Image: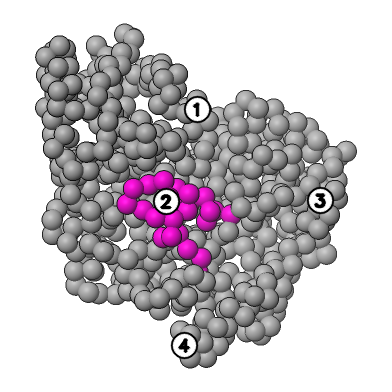
Amino acid sequence: MTDYKIEKFRFDQKNVEEWSLADPVGIDWPVVYTISNEKQIYIGETLSASSRLNQHLKTESKQSLERVQIILNSRFNKSVCLDLESQLIKLFAADGTHRVLNANSGITDANYFEREKYRESFNDLYEMLVKGGMLSRPVPEIINSNLFKFSPFKALNTEQAVVVSAIAERIIAEVEDHSSTQLIVKGDPGTGKTIVAIYLIKLLQDIALLTSAELIEQESVFSDLFNTENARSLANLRIGLVVPQQALRKTLQTVFQQTPGLDKAMVMTPFEVADAEGEFDLLIVDEAHRLGQRANQPSAAQNIKFAELNKKLYGSDDHSKTQLDWVKTKSRLQLLLLDTAQAIRPADLPLESTEELLDQAEASNSLFRLTSQMRVTGGTPYLDFVRSLFTDAPVHASGFNGYDLRFFDDASEMREQIVKLDSEHGLSRMLAGFAWPWASRSNPQAIDIQLDGLELQWNRTVTDWVNSPTAISEVGSIHTIQGYDLNYAGVIIGNDIGYDQQAKRVIFKRENYHDVKGRENNKARGFVYSDDDILHWVINIYRVLLTRGIKGTFVYVVDPDLRTHLKKYF
């Protein structure tokens, strides 16, 4: 394919006119362009660069931009330029050196003639941008970053786009009618629930800030939403994203801080929501099944705070009130992202409560489903395999479209493979159930896990452990990984579960389960949990761990009877 060429000049009337006169490509040829300064960048595509740049010169939001880059190629066409524009928006947003000024409604992932050949050629351009200092690091590193994975500029698949569009329309209608309602998005691991939430918030904010021609002219499934009436309805809409998991919350705050129209303060804990002044128009809850009951909290301070917030909101410390009640009390509209199979602790919302929420949402036409698997390349068949694995009737593994699924008899061999793949692809990590004490938490020199000659430690941090510098030499627990993607996951199924050969069923081994909060009875509400109750949550944990790997999952089982039982299904 013909080489790429980049033409550069200052972003002012004089230089735009001189370039247009000197190069006929500026009048009538598809190009991709950037307009930037040291901190901000706008990426666009057009069939007439001269005309488009002159429009930008009249746009107030572009007045601080200083430089133009025109990306040229003799084989460009409209479809290629739309694709390249979308790819560059995603890369610059995730690179973090510039704040991307684009709206996210124009991001596309459409197929077109020879798309894979064009995309392969894009790599040449990316190298030019890295060498020229526009991108700060190689593209594979950007793609592995959290800013890329959780970017509001991700291209949605058709199912996600339909869901976002339907929810946006519903929210706008409810806001205009001054109504109160609760919407639910239900989806398996890897269907993109968090991405849908982030994309939706950015979309609503862009509509509310409708001030530039770019938002009106973009052609997408969301184009009809961009009108002055909707902008007025959504103006000053107070939106919050509630993230119960500590590990993911800081990551999403960083994403929001980097994105125009969003603010890191929008990403909150349930405690912060309940303690906030005033009411929210819309609260979106990621992993809503992880909202807590009135149970013993991880710290004494949180126990005191839970009681104080109940009194503040309801006049007394009503033990029946959950963090979901806080969310409903503090907002007119709620959007809950839910997967009942990812509740992992007794303090999480009870299964009967989340199932009742789903039934109510379906009855009121407020339930939206995500079914297309976007994380694991093994697709839905692999998820079905994992879902069946700990039941009385496991299914046998198939090829799963080339998904790299391996069963190991030696934990040290599995770790060697994970370390090797991390050096080649990045984001390859060891994970395990909480079947060993966390001795290194109080003694940094202590060994937590000893297996097949290995001496390993648990994660040294919970917050964004996946990207921490020592992660490859550690083992992550469920509390570090829920909501995150890996390229390869090495999963140790610990001795907290085993296999009863006579009863022919997976069993819980309470003496080997060391997550205190994971097996704690609820004294506040008088709940006592049986081994079968806790087994339900432990199996959910392993199902989550086994669905983190995009390209592959490796498995080692500690209990000999369970190892023999499961191995034949791999």
Q: Which residue is mark 2?
A: 256
In the image shown, does 374 or 462 lie closer to the viewer? 462
Dot 2 or dot 4, earlier in sequence: 2
Residue reaching furthest right? Answer: 453
Placement of 290 over or under 194, stated as above or below: below
Mark 3 → mark 4, Cα distance in angstroms = 43 Å
Q: Are dots 4 and 1 in contact, CB under 8 Å?
A: no
| Residue at left offset 52%, top offset 77% | 322
| Residue at left offset 46%, top offset 84% | 313
Placement of 103 over or under 510, stated as above or below: above
Magenta region's main secondary structure?
helix
- Identified by mark 2, the residue type is Phe
Q: Are dots 2 and 4 in contact, CB under 8 Å?
A: no
Residue 490 in view, yes or no: no
Dot 1 or dot 3, earlier in sequence: 1
Residue 224 in view, yes or no: yes
Q: Which residue is mark 4?
A: 314
Please report the bounds of the magenta region as a residue range.
Answer: 247-270
Q: Which residue is mark 1?
A: 137
Mark 4 → mark 1, Cα distance in angstroms = 51 Å
- Identified by mark 4, the residue type is Tyr
- Identified by mark 1, the residue type is Arg
Q: What x and y, as percent, mark residue 136?
A: 47, 28
Q: How many other residues sit within 10 Å of disc 2, few (<14), some (14-19) or many (≥20)?
A: many
Dot 1 or dot 2, earlier in sequence: 1
Mark 2 → mark 4, Cα distance in angstroms = 32 Å
Query: Residue 19's image quarter?
Result: top left
| Residue at left offset 71%, top offset 31% | 419
Q: What x and y, as percent, mark residue 365?
A: 30, 66
